[in-house]
């Protein structure tokens, strides 16, 4: 009887440990909005930027257009959020780690908006503090480990048992109508109710958040340091292929806020594009032809539409470049 009690007691004590340990091996695209990007192999083609790009640019849609034109690409979305991946030293180093060092003839989409280039300036020992240094991209050095134990142990924001809970809810079909799914190509699929009342409520909240949080902060400004790293990222990508600077559309009212906060933004991006000999695809005035989940992020169907447009532009550019190269050889 005593031995049986000890065995049962040991099993009871071991069960939570086994669940915790096994959760490290079952983490997937439902675990959180970032994990998969830290487990996939190094890439040859990349999309970078904030959550607008993470949700609004679908690698598969771009690949489909380019593949039909005879260019067999495999795009990867390595965009995160304005907190995690504004342009700066942290994102720059992580991008360098994620790109295959032998990549050639790649395609790189660098998305831009004022928020990824703004900084609430704080200093420590006369050195500028970049808040993202202490977040996932700053802490996790291995961006192609599978499983990525460092990420799950030090950057996963929920208890590890939530990984099991998430999987169980999915098995039982109890996830609810709102869900996040991070695809293996890095695209973050956001499923939310698109009833007009719900959408308008989310848009009003997003506008209020932007109006309250950013323009009113006197020390929040367009950062020369972030612009410097945006240029460095473009220069880095150009060594491995062709770069396209892209501004994703937003709701009209959010566009108005951005125009007030940074009226010179498009002029600045045109200058950066010219300086680096890259194309600037500016879709900011196309808001009326797209749907948004909250005014700031494209609904997935609209993201697909925009991604196809980007793919078509890139394909036409590739075909034109090849034609000019061919004609130049005669």
Image (cartoon, rainbow, N blue to C red):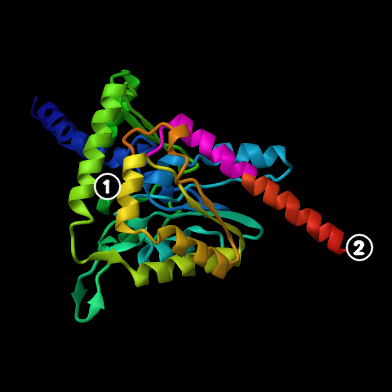
Which residue lies under the disc numbered 1?
156
The magenta stretch spans residue 307 = yes
Which residue corresponds to the image point at 26% horizontal and 51% vertical from the top-left? 153
- The boundaries of the magenta stretch are 296-312
Q: Is residue 321 left or right of residue 310?
A: right
2 vs 1, front mark = 2
Secondary structure of the magenta portion, mostly?
Answer: helix
Q: Is residue 316 left or right of residue 142?
A: right
Instruction: Tell me, yes or no, whether the highlighted magenta stretch contains residue 203.
Output: no
Give the crowd class for mark 1: few <14, some 14-19, many >=20 residues within 10 Å.
some
Q: Is residue 183 left or right of residue 217?
A: right
Secondary structure state at the residue bearing disc 2: loop
The answer to whether 15 is drawn above or below residue 49 in the figure is above
Element under disc 1: loop
In the foreground, 59 or 175:
59
Apparent side of residue 67 relative to residue 148 in the rendered image (left or right): right
Kindly tell me whether residue 140 is visible in this rendering: no
x 56%, y 46%: residue:
75
Q: Position of residue 212 (x, y in %)?
A: 17, 49
Give 93 or 223, whichever is nearer the viewer. 223
Q: Is residue 200 above or below residue 23?
A: above
> Which residue is the site of mark 2?
330
Q: Residues within 10 Å of mark 2 (few under 14, many from 20)?
A: few
Image location of residue 247, percent across then percent down: 46, 50
Q: Say whether disc 2 or disc 1 marks the residue closer to the N-terminus.
A: 1
Q: CA distance from mark 2 to mark 1?
A: 57 Å
Q: Which mark is residue 222?
A: none
């Amino acid at each position: 009887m005593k031995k049986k009690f000890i065995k049962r007691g040991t099993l009871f004590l071991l069960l939570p440990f086994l669940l915790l340990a096994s959760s490290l091996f079952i983490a997937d695209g439902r675990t959180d909005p970032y994990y998969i990007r830290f487990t996939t192999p190094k890439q040859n083609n990349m999309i970078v930027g904030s959550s607008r790009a993470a949700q609004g640019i679908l690698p598969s849609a771009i690949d489909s257009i380019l593949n039909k034109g005879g260019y067999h690409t495999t795009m990867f979305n390595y965009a995160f959020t304005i907190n995690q991946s504004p342009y700066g030293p942290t994102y720059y180093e992580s991008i360098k780690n994620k790109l295959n060092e032998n990549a050639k003839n790649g395609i790189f989409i660098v998305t831009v908006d004022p928020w990824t280039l703004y900084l609430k300036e704080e200093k420590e020992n006369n050195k500028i503090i970049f808040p993202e240094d202490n977040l996932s991209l700053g802490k996790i050095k291995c961006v192609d480990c599978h499983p990525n134990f460092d990420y799950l142990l030090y950057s996963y924001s929920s208890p590890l048992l939530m990984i099991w809970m998430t999987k169980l809810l999915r098995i039982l079909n109890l996830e609810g109508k709102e869900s996040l799914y991070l695809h293996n190509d890095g695209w973050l699929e956001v499923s939310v109710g698109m009833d007009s009342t719900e959408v308008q409520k989310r848009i009003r909240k997003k506008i209020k958040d932007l109006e309250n949080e950013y323009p009113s902060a006197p020390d929040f400004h367009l950062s020369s340091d972030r612009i410097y790293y945006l240029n460095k990222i473009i220069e880095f990508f150009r060594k491995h292929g062709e770069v396209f600077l892209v501004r994703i559309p937003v709701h009209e009212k959010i566009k108005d806020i951005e125009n007030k906060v940074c009226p010179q933004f498009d002029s600045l991006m045109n200058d950066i594009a010219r300086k680096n000999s890259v194309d600037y695809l500016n879709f900011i005035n196309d808001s009326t032809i797209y749907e948004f989940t909250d005014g700031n992020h494209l609904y997935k169907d609209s993201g697909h539409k925009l991604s196809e447009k980007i793919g078509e532009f890139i394909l036409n550019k590739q075909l034109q470049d090849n034609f000019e190269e061919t004609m130049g050889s005669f």
